Image: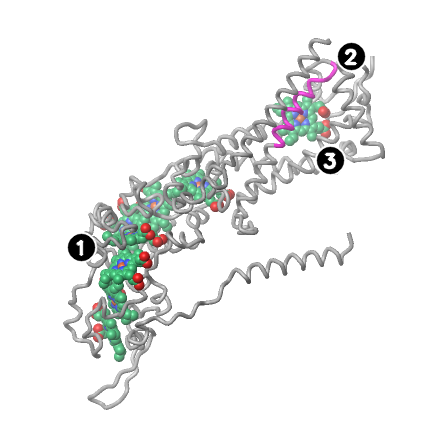
Amino acid sequence: MEQKLYLYPVWLRIWHWANAVLFLLLLFTGLSLQYSSVEFSFIDFDLAVTMHNVSGIVITIAYFMFLFGNRFSSNGRFYKAKRKGYILDLMVQIKYYIYGIFVHQKTPFPVTENRKFNPLQKLSYVASMYFLLPILILSGFALIFPEMIIKNVFGVSGIHITGLVHITTGFALSVFLFIHVYFCTIGKTPLSNFKSMINGWH
Amino acid sequence: MNRFVAKSIVIGVISFWMIVSASASYAEDTVVFENAEFNHQCFKCHGQKTYHYFNEASGKVVKDRMNPYFVMDSIAFYQSNHKSFMCTDCHSSDYENFPHNGELRMEQKFNCMDCHGGDDTYAQYQFERIEEEFQASVHSTKHSDEFTCWMCHNPHSYKINARNNDNINNVIVYDNNICLSCHANLDKYQLISDLTNPNVLITHEWLPNQALHFSKVRCIECHTEIDKEMLIAHKVQVKEKAVRRCVECHSQNSLLMATLYKFETAEKRNKLGFFNATILSDHYIIGANRNYYLNIASLIIFGFVLLGITIHAIIRIMTK
Ligand code: HEM
């Protein structure tokens, strides 16, 4: 029996669940804005606008908390791209998920004190936290203050481009969310990762 | 990357931008208008803040101030629909004399229908129908006589916009200024009414991003009854009937398609193969901008993700 590791400090857990709840709120209100109609709506348009704006602002604050935490605690080290051969490792991990897992091979990159994420997790977490989410936040704020946006980019409205960027990254992150939650069920038991994210111990 | 390369890129982009925007501003065309010479005798006085006349009693040339409401902008006049007119086509030819005869003040002015009524040349504008709608509007029912078409269509500068102006933002500014000439200007408003004019910025505080909305939609979008047959609906309704629900615009069958974007949509809609193509390229209206292909693409991607997850999960359970 391997020993338990304390991998998820309190601030991280608070951030993560706040983030998850806010993200779901944003997804829900965002969808209802995008697909609003005269005949039917989940929530009133103006209420959805307000909720979306407020959750957007709060998730931004939470995001800064995450950045701060990763900068000044040791958790940040899990997000650093390090050695060469990363692509190979990634392939190994992908192969494991496509094949190895079904024939009960050992996971190629088991969790240790210094390796919280397997290469695929690392890629998806770095991409979503340091690439997609910032774009989503920036484009979202630009839409709250549309007077800051360049009016016209080669004949297409600047707000329009910003809107497209916002929706596309929002969509990409929602896809991430589904894959993320599914892969979290791949643990010792399907629920063990979720428990870890609640009590901190892996 | 080194500094120099970065700088050159920035400079390159900026100068390209400047060339593009410079070529967009076109040269002012210098057409000579047939009645310009005749009209000049009126513009000589009515074109500026001060004017001169010869005072026979004192034998001197006197300089005086012009009533600011009687000053016309000659540039705007020669861009207007009625640019080919002589002033005296609408005004008495007795105005050629100065001082103008006091009786002239009582002159009966033409209204639009006197000239345009029943004339097939202007059938596309549907003057009769506009007249009908105007008669049923709040302005007309509450103030039938004083409120004429000229209140919104300045006789000396009115120029059709929505029909032939490619820049929709300019159309919006033009059309909104028509309404704001009274609803943001007590002097003109009180020509019609003794009421004090509620400030439109305050009465529309419920509208979020108000500045953006007022520069992207026209007052008439919310305040007139939609008329599918007409480019510009003229029946301004009482405030209780104004559009208040956001989804009337922020939805796929946005009312804007039948109003603001009507002229463009008829032409562009199907060519690009997008739904709401016009709105799509020039504007961003939450709810109405749905890119057909992106929509399909996102559904397909999402479908594959769910399918992948399901298959993976099933095999995992089976091989457990
Ligand atoms: C209902 C929604 C969600 C659930 C149930 C969930 C569940 C989990 C679980 C169980 C873990 C721990 C497993 C691991 O470390 O890989 C985790 C980690 C993580 N999740 Fe989520 N998650 C959700 C939403 C999100 C969202 C919306 C984001 C980002 C936009 C996100 C980003 C992350 C990140 C970055 C980690 C790693 C944190 C770290 O250990 O440093 N999660 N999540």
State the count of labels.
3
- In this orientation, which residue lies closer to the viewer: A78 or B90? B90
In the picture provided, is B123 more to the left or to the right than B303?
left
Q: Which image quadrant: the C terminus of chain B?
A: top right
The chain containing the residue under callout 2 comes to A
The residues bearing labels 2 and 3 have C-alpha atoms spaced at a distance of 36 Å
Chain letter of mark 3 equals A
Residue at (63% x, 24% y) in the render: B305
Q: CA distance from mark 1 to mark 2?
A: 90 Å
Amino acid type of disc 3?
Answer: Asn
Q: Residues within 10 Å of mark 2 (few under 14, many from 20)?
A: few
Q: What amino acid type is highlighted by mark number 1? A: Asp
Judging from the image, what secondary structure is the residue with disc 1 in?
loop
What chain does mark 1 sit on?
Answer: B
Instruction: Answer yes or no: disc 3 within 8 Å of ligand 1.
Output: yes
Q: Is residue B292 magenta?
A: no
For mark 2, give the secondary structure: helix
Q: Main secondary structure of the magenta part?
A: helix
Which of discs 1 and 2 lies nearer the camera? The answer is 2
State whether discs 2 and 3 lie on one chain. Answer: yes
Q: Position of residue B253 (x, y in %)?
A: 41, 35
Q: Residues within 10 Å of mark 1 (few under 14, many from 20)?
A: few
Mark drawn on residue B145: 1
**Residue type, mark 2 in image:** Val
Q: Position of residue A105 (x, y in %)?
A: 81, 14
Residue B211 percent across, percent down from the top left: 45, 49
Q: In this figure, which residue is indicated by the disc labeled 3?
A: A70
In this picture, which residue range is highlighted in magenta? A172-188
Judge from the rendering whether residue B43 lies leftward or rightward of residue A108; answer left or right.
left
Q: Which residue is mark 2?
A: A103
Q: Position of residue A143 (x, y in %)?
A: 54, 43
